[in-house]
Each structure stands twice: as C-alpha cells, then as structure tokens.
Amino acid sequence: MSQNPCKVLLVVIGDFMAQRFDLATELLVIEIQGGRLLAPPREIILDSASPEELCKIIFDNNIQVVVCGGIEERHHQFLSWKKIQVFDNVIGSSQLAIDRLCRGQLKAGDILLYSQAG
C-alpha cells in the first residue's frame, strides 16, 4: 500500500470473506493510509447478487483494490484492465484480511484463520 489513501472493497459474508465475487450481497469499504484505517469500515448491502452492480459500486466509490474469494476470469480481467488491483481466492476472516492489507502483507490465495493456540 502506498502512503496515499487507498480505497478497498472487500466482498464478505458476515465476518468472513465471501466465497464468490459474483454471488456477493455484502461488501465492506475501507480506506487505508500509512498502514492504518482512516475510518471504520462502511458496509454496503445489495438487494441481490450482481457482478455488474458490484463493478458499478467499485467505480462509483473510486475503489483501487478489491479483495474477494473466487472471481470469474472475465471480471478479474475487466477490473485489472481498469487498473484495479484484485486479491482473489482470499479465504477466512475479513478482519485478518484488513489487518494484512494495512501491513502490506495480503496476497492472493491467502487463507486467513485465527490461530487455535494462545
């Protein structure tokens, strides 16, 4: 993450990353700068799942990064073509995804589970 503010959209279901981009109805929008959140996450609830509506929200909110579970190749390519960074196949806790984003450590394919020890 750069030192400039960065707007991120996470595709979630409750406290976890949603399994699929195209079936999502719950979103979190965050803004990160200098390794910290600038405000509490903003939740967006959609009436129905629609990848087209999701893309419209991404553009309307000037999102620069999308974090999601599975995503169809055509949607991934479209977002990448529009210069939006996509971290896909992210599984597990949305809070851990946010924490890793803030530290600049999130990668596509991350499995984010809280440790059972301690």
Image (tube, grey):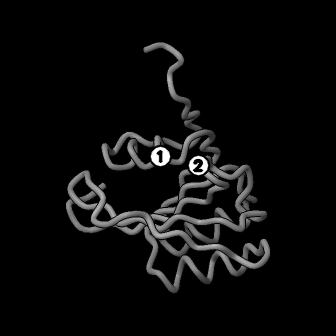
**Can you identify the residue that label 2 sits on?**
15
Q: 103 above or below 14?
A: above
Indicate the position of residue 36 as horizontal and vertical percent values. 26, 54
Q: Is the residue under label 1 in contact with that under label 2 (CB below 8 Å)? A: yes
Quadrant in which the C terminus appears:
top left
Amino acid carrying label 1: it is Gln
Residue at 58% in and 80% down: 57
Q: Give the spatial CA distance, label 2 vs label 1.
A: 7 Å
Nearest to the observer: residue 20 or residue 77: 20
The secondary element bearing badge 1 is classed as helix
Q: In this view, does 97 lie above or below 27?
A: above
Image spot of residue 107 (x, y percent): 48, 41
Snapshot quadrant of residue 8: bottom left
The correct choice, above or below, for 20 with respect to 115 in the image is below
Mark 2 nearby-residue class (10 Å; few <14, some 14–19, many ≥20):
few
**Image coordinates for residue 13, horizontal then vertical, percent:** 67, 55
In the image, 77 versus 88, the foreground residue is 88
Horizontal arrangement in the rendering, residue 2 relative to residue 6 (left or right) = left
Quarter of the view holding residue 4: bottom left
SS at mark 2? loop
Which residue reaches farthest bottom? 60
- In the image, is 106 to the left or to the right of 21? left
Of the image marks 2 and 1, the number of the one nearer the N terminus: 2
Q: Determine which quarter of the picture holds residue 112.
A: top right
Residue drawn at point x = 38 percent, y = 44 percent = 99
In the picture of the structure, the residue carrying the numbered disc 1 is 95
Disc 1 crowd rating (10 Å Cα; few below 14, some 14-19, many 20+) is few
Q: Where, quadrant-wise, is the N terminus in this rendering?
A: bottom left
Residue at 56%, 30% in the rendered image: 113
